[in-house]
Image (cartoon, rainbow, N blue to C red):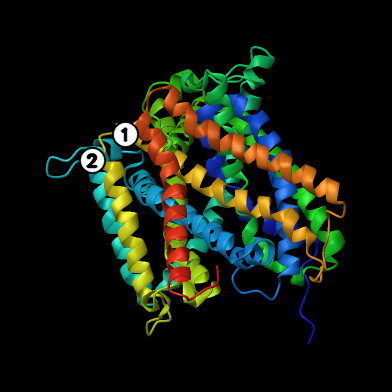
Amino acid sequence: MNKKKIKLFGLVMMIFSTIFGFANSTVAYEQMGYGSIMWYILAALFFFLPSALMLAEYGAAFKEAKGGIYSWLAGSVGEKIAFIGTFIWLASWVIWLVSTSNKVWIPLSALLFGKDTTQSWNFLGLGATQTIGLLAIIWILGVTFFSTRGMDFVAKVGSIGGIFTIVLNVIFCVASVVIWIADHGALKQPITSWSSFTTSPNPDFSTLVALLSFVVYAIFAYAGMESLGGVMDDIEKPEKTFPRAVLISTLVIALSYSLMIFMWGISTNWQEIIGNNEANLGNITYVLMNNLGVVLGQTLGLAAQTSQFLGVLMTRFAGLGMFIGYVGAFFILVYSPIKSFILGSDPKLWPKKMTSLNKAGMPAFSMWLQATIVCIFIFLVAFGGSATQKFYTILTDMANVSTSCPYLFLVGAFPFFKQRTDIERSFEFFKSRKWTWTVTAVVLLVLVGGIIFTCVEPILRHEYDTAFWTIIGPVFFGVIAWLFYHQAVAKGKLDK
């Protein structure tokens, strides 16, 4: 029986659902206002489009490999760089666990109370940031406990969160259009000139370095394409279908992000709603959704109390969808990346305990080691003395940089992958050596520039703790990987 192949529309939908994130539009508006639109378009053209086609070539050439990006890198630049690069890729997921375990309480608060109350939470004399950190540690330990026992069925609940997110997008678009029409095309965040699209109302992004650092936020909004590298064999006529799907997806996603960022300006005046210091990178989605409901009620001529209720309703709905999505994601990501990496790489690189599976088929020892590292990071960041707003900025920057770093290895290895003549390539987009090196150089320039400016920007503002935590994830895991590999070489388990 022939397996049904993925056609153009189906592939576009797969790419869109994997990459597009509703919360990316709210974060962009909070950070840069309309000015973020330009950066999202540039990131689509100079990062997402070329890197997606590179990853497609990797996936097509190494379709039989079980180790994911480890196999891609090992087959291109050797096992040592592959091990270090994939370890840093694992770091991006570990940092995601650190960041999101702190943020997961905000949608829960939004669901229960109709607004973000986490900034006032306290326990036994601990402040809000420390209390959230403590809850995050308990959350990680709980998720790890249930996941090591094979209770990953909870992950299936996450698919329901995806449905809520789709509905959330529809509600947002419909409400925004209604407000815009009722206000006769007026915007709450007025466009004064072209500078509205090149500058930011956020004083934190008033310098050139700060503006350039926003590239990492834009890159993060397009990350995740590597997870689709393994589906090339299931696509109908991949040599034609995939590049078409990537081109269409680039256009659709970039336009969707741009339109949504613009539409936030229909209901939200940046200075009034975001500039009052009550919004931060953790709760911005719920602040904007609440305001959307209130403004919609006012536009429709509803009573003040009814408008407030509509705002609370919007906040609760957003909180429900995001919380369910987070729960599902945690029960997958607490084991899937580490299991994939450990079982896909050379077992000689690991102590026996780390590769052994328990009765539930889970690498329990490795998962508890991961949980320990995550909890240490959470404790150090939460109890480092940062105020709430700065705390969520640190968490977001950590996640953005950690997510961007693995692409340095994947993109940097691509020209060497293209030099191999012993690989059967069912899909090949970059056929010219000169074109391959040129595109690689451009994408690397975007990645390196974004990462460097993100790390340098807090240093220029003398926020050394923010700079430290922003870069520590990839550096820490890169050093650990290097030590692991060289220990294996020293013990004679591997050749140099």
Q: Residue at x 61, y 32 (%)?
A: 261
The quadrant holding residue 363 is: bottom left
Looking at this view, is 257 or 239 the one in front? Answer: 239
Q: Is residue 445 left or right of residue 60?
A: left
SS assignment at label 1: helix
> As shown in the figure, which amino acid type bears the numbered disc 2?
Trp
Q: Is residue 378 left or right of residue 453?
A: left
The image's mark for residue 121 is 2
**Distance from Cα at disc 2 to Cα at disc 1:** 11 Å
The image's mark for residue 428 is none
Q: Residue 45: x, y in percent? A: 74, 39
- Extreme-left residue of the structure: 124
> Would residue 296 be visible to someone looking at this image?
no
The quadrant holding residue 477 is: bottom left
Q: Residue at x 33, y 61 (%)?
A: 371
Number of the front mark, 2 or 1: 1
> As shown in the figure, which amino acid type bears the numbered disc 1?
Thr
Tell me the crowding category of disc 1: few under 14, some 14 to 19, or many 20 or more residues within 10 angstroms, Cα based.
many
The quadrant holding residue 119 is: top left
Looking at this view, is 73 or 368 the one in front? Answer: 73
Q: Residue at x 70, y 68 (%)?
A: 231
Residue 99 drawn above or below residue 491: above
Quickly name the residue at label 1: 388
Q: Residue at x 48, y 34 (%)?
A: 455
